[in-house]
Amino acid sequence: MSGLEVKKRMNILLCIFLVLLFCLVVALVWLNVAHGEEYKNAAGSQQTRDELVSSKRGTIYDRNMKALAVSINADTVIIDPVTIRKNKAAEKISQSLSKVLSMDYDKIFKITQKKSSYEVVKKRITPEQSQSIRELNLLGVTLQEDSKRNYVYGSLAANILGFTGYDNQGLNGIEMVLDDVLKGTSGRIRVAQANGGEDMPYPYESYIDPVNGKDVVLTIDEVIQHIAESRLNEAVEKYGVKQGGCVIVMDPNTGEVLGMAVTTGFDPNNPFEVYDGASQEKIAALPEDQRAAAKTEALNKQWRSKAISDTYEPGSVFKMFTCSSALEEGVTTVNSTFVCRGSLRVGGWDIKCWRYYNPHGVETLGEGLQNSCNVVFMTLGLAMGGTTFKKYVQAFGFENKTGFILP
């Protein structure tokens, strides 16, 4: 073969190589531009494992800085299925954890068979369970520090405080409406993993600290709240009030709510239990396929706060505002007198006083307030006229939203 032919062949091979190299570069550029982020994330998920580190929710205090809701330490049980299977310990560990945690053996065994090195078995276990697991010293089983909500006074102010769910998120009351303030930000541990799924040594870990939630101070006074709930329950029981009741205690100078009691109580430490005995019996008597819906209905009823969710006619409470408006307009004075004959005709209707059968007779404005006499305040309303009366209703803010934050 002549030198010219050899040179010719070399040039052809070089061209082929350059074409292949060009195609390879184009392919690499295309992969990086079009799918670079996708492949980067896929590689990261194979080579690393993220563990969330829970933040602690902020404390809820009463006006005197008494803690009403706090976060306390509670461990979460984590297992490493890869390590457990390598040591052929799935059955032993499933039996041990099943006994300590009062969980189904098959459920735990199924978790040990997963192709991962990080699985949650049970969240927020009791201190006694934590101690038992530590004493067992099981390879592939670890306890991760977590927190759970504790309501210091049990059912006290439950309809105000609300409660948290399985993942410590606010589900009702203050816990829900101020969840973004209370919850904080979870931390993160990123652990590098070897080819077989095992964790790499400590230097390959990265750690982001959790940021705990902020505290909240309420206008509620724990002592006043306790008294309001106690007296309300006594009154409801004494007079056999089937629909229950509510009490709101306010500072008249500021409008601050010092206590807000309702009769449908529950313990926010265990909010998903139905506490009303009659409701429990009703649910138990239903066919099994109807119990879940009935329980949900009963829970919603016990969580509902009559003090802010139900509507009422203002009734005699509104007489104070009618009186104030009439005094301001000059249609009456503190020395004005009225005659109650048991009813007054308004708009073609005979509207009765509550003492229809024993009328108040002659009375001053002050006595009309003391007696809560309907006739006196109908007379004042008629004297002002509808337009003026509405002006004062609006001036007192009755057509405005209160700004109250609870749902």
Image (cartoon, rainbow, N blue to C red):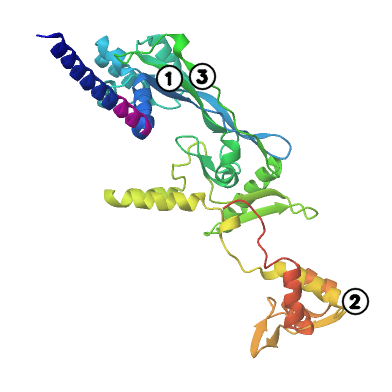
Amino acid type of the residue tagged 1 in the rendering: Gln
- Residue 282: in sight, yes or no? no
Magenta residues, start to end: 25-33
Vertical relation: 254 (above or below) 5: below
Tally the marks. Answer: 3
Taking the image as shown, residue 271 lies to the left or right of residue 18, namely: right
Which residue lies at the image location 11% right of the left edge and 9% below the top edge? 2
Instruction: Name the residue tied to disc 3.
Output: 207
Q: Secondary structure at mark 3?
A: strand
Cα–Cα gap, marks 1 and 2:
74 Å
Vertical relation: 254 (above or below) 66: below
Amino acid type of the residue tagged 2 in the rendering: Asn
Which residue lies at the image location 71% right of the left edge and 82% below the top edge? 342
Q: First in sequence, mark 1 or 2: give its number.
A: 1
Numbered disc in front, either 2 or 3: 3
Circle 2 crowding by C-alpha within 10 Å: few under 14, some 14–19, many from 20: few
Instruction: Name the residue tied to disc 1.
Output: 129
Amino acid type of the residue tagged 3 in the rendering: Tyr
- Viewer-nearest residue: 288 or 26: 26
Q: First in sequence, mark 1 or 3: give its number.
A: 1
Which SS type dominates the magenta stretch?
helix
Vertical relation: 52 (above or below) 390: above
Taking the image as shown, residue 300 lies to the left or right of residue 354, namely: left
Instruction: Name the residue tied to disc 2.
Output: 335
Circle 1 crowding by C-alpha within 10 Å: few under 14, some 14–19, many from 20: some
Numbered disc in front, either 1 or 2: 1
In the rendered image, residue 26, in percent from the top left (x then y), is placed at: 31, 29
Numbered disc in front, either 1 or 3: 3
